[in-house]
Image: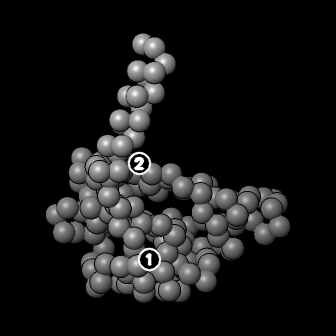
Amino acid sequence: MDRRKFLGLGLTAAALVPATLSAVDFRETQPKTWEATTTADAIKGLYGDVQLIEESVTIKAPKLAENGGAIPVFIKSDLEAKSVALFQDANPRSAVAVFTVPKGGIIDYGVKIKMRKTGKITAVVEGKNGKFYSKVLPVEVSIGGCGG
């Protein structure tokens, strides 16, 4: 394939992508979520009064984080979901991120978060069945960057 055809196909594909993707600005639509200082209040701000089912969600993160400024967190689930939200209770504001799951999307997300001190990470998956699933994981943050 010559370069002009390749570039033409790339531009066509790039023009179509914005028409098929959509995102929700949760900071605008759910502002109480981002102002909340506790995980419970942030979850309530995002989803309302919901019952969390502690199953079907996996979180992976280091048990002892050497660097609280960049803690890798991985969230997985086999659920058909509308959204995935991540919270922590170590910083002044609890909400970290909210992802809208596209139709047929796979929940296998990885992010790096900041935690100022030892605390808990909570992932909440909003299922398409109207139920809310969660997992809580404690993470110890090393003070001063030393793990010993």
108 over 139 or under it: above or below? above
Q: Is residue 80 left or right of residue 42?
A: left
Residue identified by numbered label 1 = 27
Helix, strand, or loop for circle 1?
Answer: helix
Crowdedness near tag 1: few (<14), some (14–19) or many (≥20) residues, C-alpha within 10 Å: some
Q: CA distance from mark 2 to mark 1?
A: 23 Å
55 over 17 or under it: above or below? below
Crowdedness near tag 2: few (<14), some (14–19) or many (≥20) residues, C-alpha within 10 Å: few
Amino acid carrying label 1: it is: Arg
Q: Is residue 56 visible?
A: no
Which of the 4 quarters of the picture holds residue 140? Answer: bottom right
User: Residue 67's mark?
Assistant: none
Q: Earlier in the sequence, mark 2 or mark 1?
A: 1
In the picture as drawn, the residue positioned furthest to the left comes out as 129
54 over 22 or under it: above or below? below
Q: Residue at x 63, y 58 (%)?
A: 71
Amino acid carrying label 2: it is: Asp
**In front of the other: 132 or 56:** 132
Position of residue 116 measured from the top left corner of the image (x, y, whole percent)? 69, 73
Q: Is residue 128 left or right of residue 47?
A: left
Position of residue 7 measured from the top left corner of the image (x, y, whole percent)? 45, 27
Residue identified by numbered label 2 = 108
Q: Residue at x 31, y 78 (%)?
A: 47
Position of residue 13 measured from the top left corner of the image (x, y, whole percent)? 36, 36
Q: Is residue 55 left or right of residue 7?
A: left
Q: Is residue 102 visible?
A: yes
